[in-house]
Amino acid sequence: MGMSVGGSNRGIFVEMNVVPLIDVLLVLLVIFMIIPHKQKGLMAELPQPASEVPADPQPAAIVVQVFADESLRINQEAVGWDRLTVERQVARDFWGQG
C-alpha cells in the first residue's frame, strides 16, 4: 500500500498496490487451465451392434408394372406372363390370403 501525506490540501491519499493481486490471479488461472487436462473420465460401456444380420427381408409391398409394350415387371424384376400366376400364389401364401 502506498500512502501520500501532505500537499496543498493536506489530505491523506491511500493507493492500493494491485500487482500482488494480479500475480495471484494469474497463478490461479494457470492452475485451473492445467487441472482439466489431467482429469480422466469413467469408462462407459457402449451398446454393441447386433452381430446377426437378418436374412434377405421380404419387401413390404409387391409392385406389379405392366408397360405399353405388354412387358411385365414384379418388384423391378422382369417376368413373363406365364409366371404371373405362380408369383400371385407365392404372394398369397406369404401374406396369408388364401
Image (tube, rainbow, N blue to C red):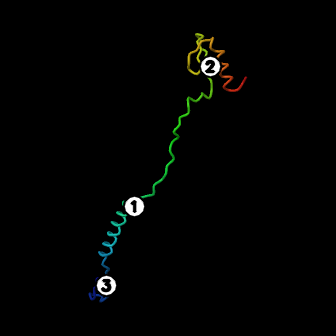
Image-quadrant location for residue 66: top right
**Pointer 1: what residue?**
39
Q: Residue at x 53, y 37 (%)?
A: 52
Viewer-nearest residue: 42 or 80: 42
- Residue 69 on image: x %, y %: 58, 10
Q: Secondary structure at mark 1?
A: loop
- Residue 43 on image: x %, y %: 45, 55
Residue type at the position of mark 1: Gln
- Residue 30 on image: x %, y %: 33, 66
Image-quadrant location for residue 16: bottom left
**Pointer 2: what residue?**
64
Q: Is residue 91 left or right of residue 12?
A: right
Q: Secondary structure at mark 2?
A: strand
Q: Residue at x 50, y 44 (%)?
A: 48
Q: CA distance from mark 2 to mark 1?
A: 62 Å
Kindly give the residue lying farthest to the left in the view shown: 7
**How many numbered dots are placed on residues in this image?**
3
> Residue 47, relative to residue 19: is it above or below?
above
Marks 2 and 1: CB-CB under 8 Å? no
**Pointer 3: what residue?**
13
Kindly give the residue lying farthest to the right in the view shown: 98
Q: Residue at x 58, y 14 (%)?
A: 79
